[in-house]
Amino acid sequence: MLFVHELHRVMGAHEDEFERAYRDEWMPTLAASDDARLLYFMRHAHGTGRAYNIVTVTAVTDGRAWEELARRVSRGDLRGWARIVDGFRHDVTSKVLVPVEWSPLQEVELGRVPLDGGEHDQSLFMEDTAWPHAGLMEDYLTAARDNYAPSLAEGRHGGRSLLELQAVFTAAWGTSARRREVILWQRVTRPAGITGLVTSEVPPEHKAPGTWMHDALRLRDDWESRLLRTSAWSPLF
């Protein structure tokens, strides 16, 4: 299964029209077949990044399904929709993601993805994107599997963790400007706990040798966090 991740720089005056285009047209149009679904429609949480940035994630069953959907957007029945949507945004950056072999999320049962646009509680996600040092991609993934993921699980069971690791992605070959890229897709389980991350420094004991914050520096020191809030109708949240 492939996951098409798009970061849209939307024009502020057209934000609502852009959202309606995805909710009322893109989502139901994909539902007419069995091989693609819109999964997430998310905004950058206010105050955490560039204004009017929206992230969408669309799942397709395989490469054939991706090719067919790409053809529909470029010169098929979705061409007109794409032209209208382009008029609502300054730019869009896309990449095709694949889950690593130990990612908690591997497949999505597309037939069970909601399609009615019904409203629900909103959730907060932390999307951490890391760019490991040259030649250390596999080492970083191994360390994330053996150290980072277990520490989140242990903290969650003990009621301490803020995050639940839902998926780990890398860019599919040939689909991203940066080959060495890892995305940790994490649901924020205790949103109130985020306050401590932005109002105080990381305690020294959390950066000491033997901790992820310290040991991972051998493998990467270039990474970015985004706080993303699902829309009230996002199929997954």
Image (spheres, helix red, strand yellow):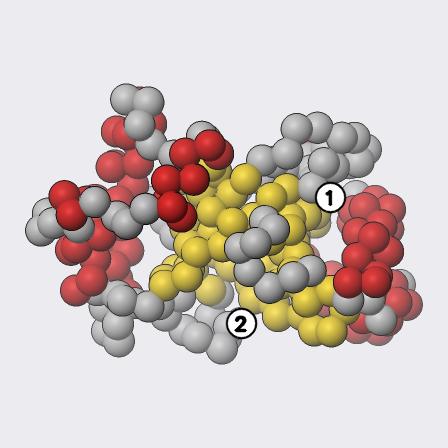
Question: Taking 151 as reference, is 18 left or right?
Answer: right
> Do we see residue 1 in this rendering?
no
Label 1 element class = loop
Badge nearest the viewer, 2 or 1: 2
Q: Is residue 142 above or below residue 115?
A: below
Q: Which residue is mark 2?
A: 175
88 or 149: nearer the viewer: 88
Label 2 element class = loop
Q: Is residue 49 above or below residue 93?
A: above
The number of discs equals 2
Label 2 amino acid?
Thr
Which label is found at residue 154? none
> Farthest top residue?
158
Label 1 amino acid?
Asp
Q: Is residue 197 above or below residue 65?
A: above
> Farthest front residue?
199
Image quarter of residue 109: top right
> Callout 2: few (<14), some (14-19), or many (20+) C-alpha neighbours within 10 Å?
few
Q: Which residue is mark 1?
A: 34
Question: Taking 59 as reference, is 29 left or right?
Answer: right
Q: Are marks 2 and 1 in contact (CB under 8 Å)?
A: no
**Location of residue 38 in the rendering, given as x and y in whole percent from the top left corner:** 70, 47
Q: Earlier in the sequence, mark 2 or mark 1?
A: 1
Question: Taking 214 as reference, is 66 left or right?
Answer: right
> Do we see residue 197 in this rendering?
yes
146 or 232: nearer the viewer: 232
126 or 110: nearer the viewer: 126
> Callout 1: few (<14), some (14-19), or many (20+) C-alpha neighbours within 10 Å?
few
The residue lying at 25 percent from left, 59 percent from top is 140
**Location of residue 87 in the rendering, given as x and y in whole percent from the top left corner:** 85, 71
Image quarter of residue 150: top left
